[in-house]
């Protein structure tokens, strides 16, 4: 069933009339009565763009501005610029829409979709205040931010189950093992493994029509690392796009279509796609909300993040946006658009981290901590 939104059309159906042309430059302006795009970060607003930002990843503690009651949101003013993952986009767009109404249009939020890698480039260049990410920040991106003096707070916001999809008319694929997925998508499969029968004996001799996220996508990074053992290691002879809707169109458009994307995009389009069960070693498991939440949909369950510039978080309108994102309203919106909220105990830990202004990464970089999201957060505070 499609998620229902009270104030705007379905997010993942992309009936919202804000997305223009190429996905790399698509921007959503979310504010009631806003008449112009906000200025780019780095302009005249000194509070949003300090001339000498602190070094990144120090883990220093600096408390956020005092929290407001939602009844006081109309007193807030300012701009928030966000870019990054197309997977995280539906959550951020929904939160931004509701926040815009609560602030009566006095806070304007733009949400761009240039992929996780593209978002981090803009983030570490000081162009945006928040970066959406469907994977943790890489060591190279940590260094990029450090070189630019950008300090950030890492915030898990929900759980996603990366979903392998085939056409609804595909009758032969019900479940695939991790090994079969690697056979299909490995670099050495390029121009070699082109027919279904080469993935599993007994499947048709028809050629596969393959669609997947592009190299700037966190979904691409995560899938290739989990399935192939190395981030970015993939065949290149497939139709690539940072726009998940083009992947949906491709797979649904032909009987031999196959691809992968975030669970919420599959859920919204379940009427024209079929999700493939995945056998990670313990039997075939379907991508469902329950299986993603309890960890049985392994190894393709993953945390989703926002990264907030610490200097920007010191401004009340951005601090309140993050609080709203992590609160019950934001959790409900994440569920509405097809993702799985964490237990409240996780959000309590995340909010405490944010309120204390604890910067740096514990999920990414050179030495990521291991364990569940709750364990990592508890052990890092």
Image: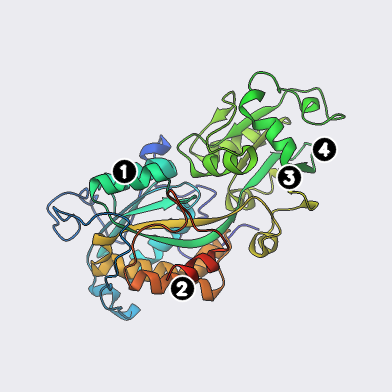
Q: Secondary structure at mark 4?
A: loop
- Residues under labels 4 and 1: Cα distance? 47 Å
129 relative to 98, above or below: above
| In contact (CB < 8 Å): disc 3 and disc 4 | no
Q: CA distance from mark 3 to mark 4?
A: 11 Å
**Between disc 2 and disc 4, whose residue precedes?**
4
The residue mark sitting in front, 4 or 1, is 1
Q: Secondary structure at mark 1?
A: helix
Q: Is 275 positioned to the left or the right of 334 in the image?
A: right
> In this orientation, which residue lies closer to the viewer: 195 or 243?
195
Question: Residue 320 lies in what quarter of the image?
Answer: bottom left
Whether residue 150 is visible, yes or no, is: yes
Q: Report how far apart the C-alphas of labels 2 and 4 lie in the structure.
A: 45 Å
Q: Which residue bears the numbered disc 2?
A: 349
Q: Which mark is residue 341?
A: none
Closer mark to the observer between disc 3 and disc 1: 1
Q: Residues within 10 Å of mark 4 (few under 14, many from 20)?
A: few
As drawn, the label of residue 144 is 1
x and y, in percent, of residue 6 in the image = 49, 66
Task: Kindly identify the residue that appears in the image at 48 percent across and 53 percent down.
Answer: 88
Q: Which residue is mark 4?
A: 171
**Which quadrant of the figure contains the C terminus?**
bottom left
Q: Position of residue 13 (x, y in %)?
A: 54, 49
Question: SS of the residue at dot 3?
Answer: loop
Which colour assignment does the render follow? rainbow
Q: Position of residue 142 (x, y in %)?
A: 36, 48
Q: Residues within 10 Å of mark 1 (few under 14, many from 20)?
A: some
Spatial separation of the CA atoms under disc 3 and disc 1:
37 Å
**In the picture, which quadrant includes the N terminus?**
bottom right
* Left or right for 258, reference 101: right
Query: Which mark is first along the chain, 3 or 2?
Result: 3
Q: Which residue is mark 3?
A: 276
């Amino acid at each position: 069933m499609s998620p229902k939104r009270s104030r705007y059309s379905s997010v993942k159906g992309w009936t919202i009339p804000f997305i223009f042309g190429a996905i790399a430059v698509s921007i959503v302006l979310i504010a009631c009565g806003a008449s112009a795009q906000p200025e780019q970060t780095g302009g005249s607003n000194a509070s949003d763009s300090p001339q000498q930002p602190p070094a990144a990843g120090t883990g220093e503690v600096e408390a956020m501005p005092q929290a407001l009651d939602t009844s006081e949101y109309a007193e807030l003013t300012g701009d928030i610029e966000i870019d990054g993952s197309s997977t995280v986009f539906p959550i951020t767009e929904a939160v931004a829409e509701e926040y815009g109404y609560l602030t009566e249009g006095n806070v304007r939020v733009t949400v761009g979709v240039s992929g996780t890698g593209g978002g981090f480039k803009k983030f570490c260049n000081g162009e945006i205040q928040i970066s959406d990410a469907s994977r943790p920040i890489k060591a190279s991106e940590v260094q990029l931010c450090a070189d630019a003096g950008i300090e950030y707070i890492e915030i898990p916001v929900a759980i996603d189950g990366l979903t392998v999809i085939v056409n609804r008319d595909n009758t032969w694929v019900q479940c695939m093992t991790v090994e079969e997925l690697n056979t299909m998508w490995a670099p050495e499969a390029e121009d070699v493994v082109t027919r279904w029968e080469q993935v599993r004996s007994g499947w048709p001799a028809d050629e596969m029509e393959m669609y997947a996220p592009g190299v700037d996508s966190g979904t691409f990074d995560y899938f290739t690392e989990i399935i192939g053992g190395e981030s970015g290691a993939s065949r290149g002879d497939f139709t690539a796009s940072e726009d998940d809707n083009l992947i949906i169109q491709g797979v649904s458009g032909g009987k031999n279509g196959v691809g992968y994307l975030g669970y919420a995009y599959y859920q919204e389009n379940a009427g024209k796609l079929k999700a493939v069960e995945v056998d990670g070693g313990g039997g075939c498991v379907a991508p469902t909300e329950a299986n993603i939440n309890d960890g049985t949909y392994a190894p393709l369950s993953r945390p989703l993040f926002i990264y907030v510039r610490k200097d920007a978080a010191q401004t009340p309108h951005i601090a309140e946006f993050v609080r709203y994102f992590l609160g019950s309203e934001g959790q409900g919106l994440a569920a509405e658009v097809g993702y799985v909220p964490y237990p409240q105990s996780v959000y309590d830990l995340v909010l405490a981290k944010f309120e204390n202004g604890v910067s740096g990464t514990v999920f990414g970089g050179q030495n990521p901590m291991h364990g569940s999201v709750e364990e990592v957060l508890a052990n890092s505070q």
